[in-house]
């Protein structure tokens, strides 16, 4: 039988998977730049502790690159990278639910673990589908996506953080009305405390409302930063769909042997 090679659609589908993977890695890095300062203000951890959010991810990602590649060789690259994507999406969901510094650190470390098991297998898989004379073109495309992630990622995450913060703020402000008994109770409690501390009734009421509004602003900003983690999870799920669509690679020799 004449030898067969893997079809071009399969080749470029896997290359698209690698390109999206490059974009996802850079988008993940932009969270530290864009969303972490807001999380630091709300969760009240120190600048030194903030560095651990970066370090936990980098250590997990860097230390598992070789391990992920070796496991991919042993058990199949496609299923190892799928496992890495599922882990990354789950870790992003945990980050989106983080209400404490410990949970945030754990989520970042698990994101690094997921990408560590994903990145090397997907790179090896993508280039194994391509003939040698197309490797330079493939490298150019993946480098383009990496650079786009660096420029587009920061702009996208910054815009998303602002828009989601505005959305959450509008929802929270709707609760700060006289019709809300919980708001009235909190306002009365803080007003009584400030009055007992020496403020006049009018000043105490105004300050109490300002304090509650400030908390609402902080909560809106924090919820917006957590939405950035959810976005990474959705990107990972989209990449997972591409990974599931890829077919097992058959070289020319293996195809002609049957």
Image: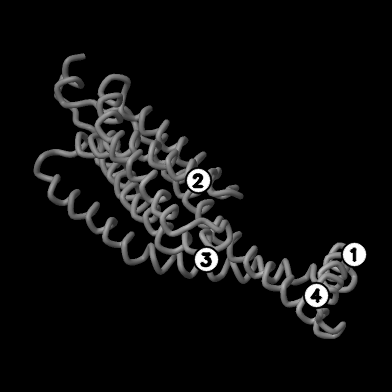
| Residue 181 x %, y % | 90, 64
Q: Nearer the viewer, residue 118 or 108?
A: 108
Looking at marks 4 and 3 on the same chain, the residue that comes earlier in the sequence is marked by 3
The residue beneath circle 1 is 181
| Residue 135 x %, y % | 14, 45
Q: CA distance from mark 1 to mark 2?
A: 35 Å
Q: For mark 3, give the secondary structure.
A: helix
Residue 82, placed above or below residue 166:
above
Q: CA distance from mark 2 to mark 3?
A: 16 Å
The residue beneath circle 3 is 161
Image quadrant in which the C terminus is located: top left
Mark number for residue 197?
4
Q: CA distance from mark 4 to mark 3?
A: 38 Å
Q: For mark 4, give the secondary structure.
A: loop
Looking at marks 1 and 2 on the same chain, the residue that comes earlier in the sequence is marked by 2
* Residue at the spot 42% in from the left edge and 41% down from the top edge: 109
Residue 134, placed above or below residue 253:
below
Q: CA distance from mark 1 to mark 3?
A: 30 Å
Mark 3 residue crowding within 10 angstroms, few (<14) / some (14–19) / many (20+): many
The residue beneath circle 2 is 92
């Amino acid at each position: 039988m004449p030898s067969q090679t893997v079809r071009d659609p399969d080749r470029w589908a896997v290359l698209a998977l690698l390109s999206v993977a490059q974009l996802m890695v850079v988008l993940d890095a932009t969270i530290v730049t864009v969303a972490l300062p807001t999380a630091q203000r709300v969760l009240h951890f120190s600048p030194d502790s903030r560095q651990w959010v970066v370090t936990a991810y980098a250590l997990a990602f860097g230390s598992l690159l070789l391990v992920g590649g070796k496991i991919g060789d042993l058990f199949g690259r496609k299923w190892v990278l799928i496992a890495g994507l599922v882990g990354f999406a789950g870790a992003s969901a945990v980050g989106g639910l983080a209400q404490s510094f410990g949970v945030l650190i754990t989520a970042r470390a698990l994101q690094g673990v997921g990408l560590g098991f994903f990145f090397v297998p997907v790179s090896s898989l993508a280039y194994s589908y391509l003939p040698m004379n197309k490797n330079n073109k493939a490298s150019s495309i993946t480098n383009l996506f990496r650079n786009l992630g660096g420029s587009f990622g920061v702009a996208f995450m910054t815009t998303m953080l602002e828009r989601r913060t505005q959305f959450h703020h509008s929802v929270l402000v709707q609760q700060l009305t006289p019709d809300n008994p919980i708001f009235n109770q909190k306002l009365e409690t803080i007003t009584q405390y400030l009055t007992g501390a020496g403020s006049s009734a009018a000043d105490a009421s105004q300050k109490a409302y300002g304090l509650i509004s400030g908390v609402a602003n902080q909560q809106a900003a924090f919820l917006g930063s957590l939405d950035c983690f959810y976005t990474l999870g959705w990107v990972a799920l989209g990449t997972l769909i591409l990974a599931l669509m890829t077919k097992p690679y058959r070289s020319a020799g293996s195809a002609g042997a049957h």
